[in-house]
Image (tube, grey):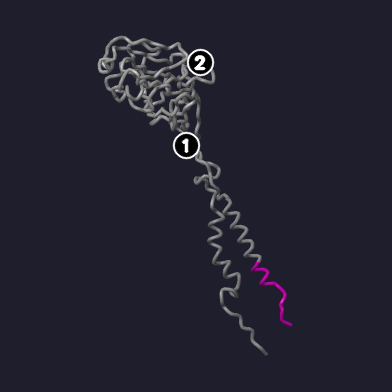
Amino acid sequence: MSTEYRSDTPANRPAWRWSLLLLPLLVALLLTPSPHASGAQTESMIFESTPDDGHLTLSGSGDWDALKTSQKPADVFDTLRYVKVNTRPDVIYRGFLFFDTAAIPDDADITNAVLHIYAKCTGDLDDTGLYVLSGTDDYPHQPLVPEDYALPAGGLPVCARVDVGSWTRELAYREVPLDEPGAVVRVAGTTKLCLPERRDYENETPPDLHSENELKLYSHEEGDGFRPYLEVFWTAASPAGETPQPEPNGPGVSRPVIGPSGIAALAALTGAVGIVLWKRYRPSRHG
């Protein structure tokens, strides 16, 4: 009478032992929730510039220093098809854009803002640059007045700077992302932007009367499809006094939710149990 000897190698080790070893891992995977979206909802809105957009022009004799420090009243242009931004030794153009952003909720958390302008660079130089400055509640006036030509003594925060030489000769919509949008966008009223040319802001004297750095963009007067517009994104705040509710699959939910990894674990566990049962109850090969 022979005695059957079964090796205890991993290949011949009873399947139920491996099932017991894998069971904790499979259970952990089974209870892993599916990926879920953040509870904060992002909203966005597009605001076209108002009819008050335009530019101010100050002309001089060709003396750049005298022009920069001039106290003469500027000429106001707020009913033209174009908003000009330009520098020459004898003239400076400064553009201004207004956006009625009062529709944004007062408690919104502004996360992003992009200025879209239908513009081209018509200057002779390839070093034309555009600064976008954030206006204040008191500056500039709405509508523009000649005194708005003089920037506030304390200056204005720079919310964007872009090299626009590549815009030469081609009119198209250009995107200018704004830095620190939460400080730029006025949720309680009008968002104001001041647009000076690079040499104007950096006080760099143009080499001669022919060195024109001009940027031309369409104004509100041009009509639909060409107007400047401001695209604003924000996160809606939870109503006061209410506790934000977790997502159905969020980490705050007490009940376990089977995600993709849990489904795979369940299939593996079922297969392991099936192997155990088959090995235990299969017909014997010995007579």
Residue type, numbered disc 2: Glu
Residue drawn at point x = 50 percent, y = 35 percent: 41
Residue drawn at point x = 50 percent, y = 40 percent: 38
| For residue 134, above or below residue 33 | above
Q: Camera-side residue: 274 or 147?
A: 147
Q: Camera-side residue: 15 or 116?
A: 116
Residue type, numbered disc 1: Thr
The residue pinned by badge 2 equals 222
| For residue 101, above or below residue 251 | above
Left or right placement of residue 144 versus residue 207 in this view:
right
Q: Secondary structure at mark 2?
A: helix
Q: Camera-side residue: 116 or 190?
A: 116
Residue drawn at point x = 29 percent, y = 10 percent: 72
Left or right placement of residue 4 versus residue 49 in this view:
right
- Report x, y in % for residue 65: 25, 18
- Residue 138 visible within the image: no
Give the class, few, some or many, for how many residues have Cα within 10 Å of label 1's Cα (few <14, many ≥20).
few
Question: Nearer the N terminus, badge 2 or badge 1?
Answer: 2
Magenta span: 275-287
Question: Is residue 281 shown in magenta?
Answer: yes
Residue lying farthest to the bottom in this orientation = 1
- Report x, y in % for residue 196: 36, 21
Q: Camera-side residue: 262 or 198?
A: 198
- Residue 17 visible within the image: yes
| Label placed on residue 61 | none
The residue pinned by badge 1 equals 243
Residue contact between numbered discs 2 and 1, judged by CB atoms under 8 Å: no
Q: Secondary structure at mark 1?
A: loop
- Report x, y in % for residue 197: 36, 23
Question: Is residue 285 shown in magenta?
Answer: yes
